[in-house]
Structure formats: C-alpha cells, structure tokens
Image: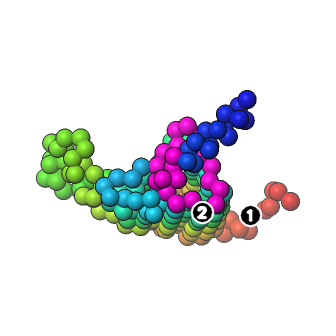
Amino acid sequence: MKKFLKKGINIFNNYRFSKKAIFRGSVNLSNINSSIKLILGSKKEDIVLSDRCVVFGSLISCNRGKIFFEKNVQIGFKTIVGAVDSVTIGEGTVISNNVVIMDNNNHSVNPEDRKIMQNSPVGSKFRNWTYSVSKPIVIEKNVWIGQFARINKGVVIGENSIIAAGSIVTKDVPKNSVAAGNPAKIVKENIQDEPRLIL
C-alpha cells in the first residue's frame, strides 16, 4: 500500500510541478513537502531539473533567478535552494537535509533600506530578494553537502568535494577537498587518494 501511495504522490507532484519547472527526464518529487515557487516574474524555464533528480526540499526562483540541476542530483528534506541570479548543481551531487543554498543576502544591508522593508506590508515589493546583493553559485559534479550546511552567494565548490555538516561556506572550495566549520575552511585535500572502501 505504501509503495502505491508513494508512486501516487510522485505522479501528482510531477504533474503539479511540471507547470513550474522544466523536467529533462524522470524527476522524483515524492515528498509531500517538496515545493517549487516562482516569485516576481520568474517562469517555468527558470528552473531546469535533469534526469534522475530527487527533490525532497524547496526550490525558489525570484525575479527570473535560474536554478539548474544536472543529472542525478538529490536534495534532502527541508533543504532550500533560492536564486535571484543563478544556482547550478553538477551531476551526481548529493545535498543532505536542512541545507540552505542561497545566491543572495535576502535583504539589503543598508539600514535605511531595511527600515523600509520592515515597515512594508507582507507581500510588498520591498520584501523580496530583488533588493539584495546576489552572485551565482556553482556546485560541481559529485559534491556531497552535509546537513545544516549553508552555501552563500558567489561560491564555487569544486568537483568531488565534501562540505561537512553545519558548515557555512563563504569562499570557494577547491576540487577533491573537505571543508568544515563556520566559516568553512579546508581541512583535507586530495581526497581522491583516500583508500577505496567499496571494491
């Protein structure tokens, strides 16, 4: 029974979200809490999900921000990917639960701008990401990101790297590295040379 229910939820979500994103192959949105939001002029074409992607979290495009997942990308429960500029995630990348990937500050840094924002009603044009600094995020192939991590604007995470749980990434991470901490620092390099455990 659970198998049929899960399949039904996935079919329903795929139909519902196919109006909000481009699917290039089979996409799994079987979590009832999965969501895709298009805000302030964003269109279906601004979010592209490739074959074998799994989305258990939320994707948010604001003001035509681009979100692009290559093949076989997975994002976990309560993970948020938000774009005003662009977020690109490479093939085979796995992102755990409760991760935030945000290409913008969500608000202006200027105190006077923040006063206007705070004193505006909910839903006002001043309460959106358009009035924030944004820079593209690129997460390359086969990256793993631990739960409760945050990836900030303008960051490039290199191929095969690992971001430890709870890390706040504010600077680029080279390929084949492990980054950990707040702010995240490189704690291990050349992980491609680590001993194989699955043979």
Residue at coordinates 24% horizontally, 48% vertically from top-left?
127
Quarter of image, res 161 = bottom right
Q: What residue is pinned by disc 1? A: 194
Dot 2 or dot 1: first in sequence order is 2
Considering only vertical position in the picture, is 123 above or below 110? above
Q: Which mark is residue 24?
A: 2
Residue at coordinates 65% horizontally, 56% vertically from top-left?
26
Label 1: how many Cα within 10 Å (few below 14, some 14–19, many 20+):
few
Q: Nearer the viewer, mark 2 or mark 1?
A: 2
Give left or right: position of 39 versus 125. Answer: right
Considering only vertical position in the picture, is 98 above or below 42? above
Give left or right: position of 124 versus 147. Answer: left
Amino acid type at mark 2: Arg
Q: Nearer the viewer, residue 107 or 157?
A: 107
Counting from the top left corner in percent of width and height, residue 91 is at 63, 65
Considering only vertical position in the picture, is 51 above or below 175? above
Residue at coordinates 62% horizontally, 43% vertically from top-left?
10
Region rendered in magenta = 16-36
